[in-house]
Structure formats: C-alpha cells, structure tokens
Image (cartoon, rainbow, N blue to C red):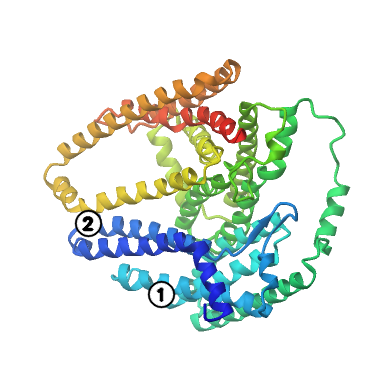
Amino acid sequence: MSSRLATLAWEIWCRGSRSARLAFGCVAGCALINLIAQNRFSASDFGPGLFNSLFGLLMACSLFLMMGVFNYTEFSSTREWNGFPYRLFTLPLRTWQLVALPMFLGVVSVELLYLAWIKLVWTHDSIVRPEWFAVVLGAYMIFYQAALWSLAGFRIVRLLVLSLGGVSSIAVACLPMFDEVVPSPWFSETRLIAILLFLAFIAFIVAWRTVARQRCGGGLRRHWIKILLERITDALPRRAKDFSSPAAAQFWFEWRRAGLLLPACTSLVLAVIFGPFSWFCRNDPQATVDLLLRILLMPLVLAFCVGKAFVKPELWSTDFALPPFLAVRPLSAGEFVISKLKVATLSVAATWLLIVVFIALWLPLWADDTNLNGLMVKFRMLYPQSWQTIIILYFAGFVVLTWRCLVSGLWIGLCGNRSYYVAASLLQVITVALLLLAAGILSDTIDVEIRDNPVRLISIALSVTGWLLTIAVIVKLWFAVFSWSKITPRCAWQYIFIWLFATLGFVVLGILSRPWADTHRLEHLYVLAAFLIFPFARLGLAPLSLAKNRHQ
C-alpha cells in the first residue's frame, strides 16, 4: 500500500465489501427496472405507487447496509467493550486520522449511494428537496459513528442513543416541511443545513477526544454516569428470595438482558415523535386519525426490528454461537426457548400498556377527534351488535402480531449459523421486492382487467388466494407435526392449547368483521388466514436448533 491511511481504508473496505456490493446491487437492480419499465409510470394507474414502494424499500435497505459497512467496532466480552478497535491504537497514525478516515469514507460512500439513487432510480422527481436529504444522511453517518465509539462501554445507553438518532432522523428530515404550515426562519433549509453541519463537526470533535482518551488509558471503566447508575441500582429494592427453579432464574436473566428493549424503544418513539407531532397537529381532525393508525402500527415495526436481535442467543453480540455461560446451565433446550417466549410476552404486554396509556391521555386531552368520532359512528352502524367485540379482538390481534414479529425467527436465530440468519433476513426483503416488481410489471394488465372484466378478475384472485392459503396451511401443519414430535408432551400440549385459542380468536374476528354487503363469501379465506397468523411450526423447531447450537 502507498500509505498507512490507504492500508486502513483497504481494511475497512474488506470488512464491509459484501454489504457494500449488496447496497450498490440494489441501486443497479432498481436502475435496470426503472430503465425497462419507465413508460409504465405514466401509462398505468397502479404502476407508479408499486414501483415507488419497491424503490423505497430497497433504498432503505441499501442505506442500512452502507451504515453497517462503517460500523467500525470490535467486540470484547472480557472488557464489556464494543467500540473503536483497540488494535488500531498501536498504528503510527494520529488519533484524529484514525477517527476522520472512517467518518470521511462513510460520508463519501453514503453520499455516492444516495446520488446513484437520485440520478439512476428516482428520475421522476419523486424526492422533494434532494440536497437537504443528502445533508441529513451525511450528518447522521457522523452521528452514528460518534455514538458507536463514544458510548462503547454503555450498551443500554448507546442503544437508546442510536434508537433516538434513527427516530430523530425522520423528524429532522421533515423539518423543512413545517415551513409551509408554520412559517419560521428556523425551518429554512439554509439555517437547518448550517445547524446540522455544526452539530456534525461537534460530533467529530467528541469522537476524536473520546478515542484519544481511550488510546491513552484504554478507556476508564468507571465513569461518573456509570457510578450514578450503579448507586441508583443499589438503592432499588432487590430480590430477597431464591429462585424457585432454574427456569425462573433463566427468565429473570433473559428479562434483564432483552426484555426492556422493546418497551424502551416504544416509549422513546412516543416521547420524541408522536408526542410532539400530536401536539402540533392537535387542531387537525384528519391528523388525529392518521396518527392513531401509525401509533397502532408502530409496535409491529419496532418488534420486527428488535426481533432480529432478540432471536439470537446473545442480544448484543454478532456471534451466533451459544455462550458457554448459557450452554452449561441446567436447563433443556425447550426450557431456554420457553423462557424467551415468556420474556417476549411480558415485553409485548409492557409495550402495549404504554400505547394504551398514551392514547388514553392524548385523545381526551389535546386531540381533535371530530373525524374519529364520525368513523366510530359509521363503524357502529355497520356492526351494531358486535362492534365492541370486534374492537377487543382487533386490539388482541395487534398484540399477537407484535409478539409474532418478536419471536417468529427464533428457530433460525438460535441455530448458530450466520449464513442461515442472513439468508432468512434477505429472503424477507427479496420476497416483498419481487411481489412489488411483479405487480408493477403487470400493472397494465391489471388495469385492463379491472376496466373490462372486474368480476372475472376478482374470481380468479379469490381462487388463487384460496389455493395458496390452503397449501400454506397444509405445509405449516405438516412441519408442525415434524417439529413438535421431539418436544416434551407437556410443553407441546401447552403451546397447542395457546395456538388453538389465539387462532380461534382470529377466526371469530374474521367472521364478525365480514362486510355486510359481502357477495363473494370470503369466510373460508378468513379461516385459512387465521391458521397462518399465530406461529406454530417454526417455534417447534427452535429447541432443536438450540440443541444443535449448544453441542457444537
């Protein structure tokens, strides 16, 4: 290599080259789709929305992948450290160079990726204020790396800061739009860009000084914030009784490690995003309806994201092998999985309790519920006898779906194979992308069929949906018989009872909420879909996956 900095840059690229190729591969694929199907944006009624949804999904994935490329940290369980690589402290480079190079490369890479999206994919002026979003992306790349390195010894605090940063990036990106509602010089792009650049410079200085301090002393393990937290923890009431069983001890251990993550993220989003937005839009009746829908969907999105880490043996580690501390516990693989399921249940219950408390305070105190009351009147007219039951079942359904998003990947997360885990995550994105792509390509045909033969199109769609759901139910039950055959009968019957109870609830919900003017008799589709919602077969495979990982 020609210089030490070039050597370090090459090492960074080698560590994240796979993610970088995937990120730019998303751009290349979408650019090819845009080039081939660009005429459909104007010729079809549904094409633009479908293609924009596909491009938006893959763009978000590519930006996350690029962020991961410059997650330049190393994990050490002995030091409880996940920060700037210690081995780089011996290099003959100044500290500001060690810090500035990954930041510079990260900003350049994310800006080049964003520019590629703008010039090759979003060629129909779909993105408003592209320069402002470019500044936000570059600044938040610096904030992201500064948080990783500066809070290396504080895992919970760092996670909360990163969560706050991810949520706040959405709010900050929308700030110039408030200038149209509330004219103010503080919402002008020029002033906001200057503020973001100044904050990015401050973040660089903080990261530089923190890494320099770590380089001189290796990082002081006792900090005044940590001392304060330890004193507060010592002052709190502690458990005085022994655990009744090893399973109870494992449940307590899992709850302390991962149980509070989803409620903490939910409370953060409610306080930082929905709280201020609900106050600013308190006089807009339509905004109340829109915010309520987003609040109800927010736990599902958070549970899906948190679930990617929750299903691993070690929440904070990138190693998928079962830690020796857990492998030697006097518990069976099934009891390990049951402890995780119980922790997920309690975490989801705490999350939805926060949602209910926020809605109960928001709607009567500062929300304009005119439109919401009108919708409720229409809803009660459609279902005069069962509207209360339907609302309760819908709420229970949201809770169950949140729990499903949190635990459905346990069987793949506990197997200990990184390739399977990455492949399963990519498959979820690729499946949605392919469905959107197919719908976008066939949008012209769909438009013609809707105009000429709507009854025939609906009949074909219902028939195909029915057969697909039937095949999915058969496959699910077959895998369930295979996966639960090696589980203890007591645990198997307990979970089967819970599954039947939850499935029956979804069946009743589908039948009760059927439109009164339904001429297509869709009850059989509701029943088949209800059998697929609650996880069954995959959770039976989780103990088998953990047992294999445990004995590797």
In this rendering, is residue 67 above or below 232?
below
Q: Determine crowd level at label 1: few under 14, some 14-19, many 20+ residues with C-alpha closer than 10 A.
A: some
- Residue at image location 55% in from the left, 55% down from the top: 367
* x then y, percent, for residue 92: 67, 78
Please state which amino acid type lies under the numbered disc 1: Pro
Inter-mark Cα distance, 1 to 2: 26 Å
Q: Secondary structure at mark 2?
A: loop
Mark positioned earlier in the residue sequence (1 or 2):
2
Please state which amino acid type lies under the numbered disc 2: Asp
Q: Determine crowd level at label 2: few under 14, some 14-19, many 20+ residues with C-alpha closer than 10 A.
A: some
- Residue at image location 56% in from the left, 60% down from the top: 167
* x then y, percent, for residue 284: 48, 60
Left or right: 461, with 298 as reference point: left
Q: Nearer the viewer, residue 156 or 80?
A: 80
In this rendering, is residue 15 above or below 216?
above
Quadrant location of the C terminus?
Answer: top right
Q: Nearer the viewer, residue 13 or 56?
A: 13
* Residue that carries the numbered disc 1 in the rendered image: 130
Task: Say which of marks 1 and 2 sits in front.
Answer: 1
Q: Nearer the viewer, residue 260 or 354?
A: 260
Left or right: 36, with 404 as reference point: left
* x then y, percent, for residue 94: 67, 80
* x then y, percent, for residue 5: 57, 78
Left or right: 160, with 467 as reference point: right
- Counting labels gives 2
Residue 525 in view here? no
- Residue at image location 52% in from the left, 74% down from the top: 105
**What is the number of the mark on residue 516?**
none
* Residue that carries the numbered disc 2 in the rendered image: 45
Q: Determine which quarter of the picture holds residue 487.
A: top right
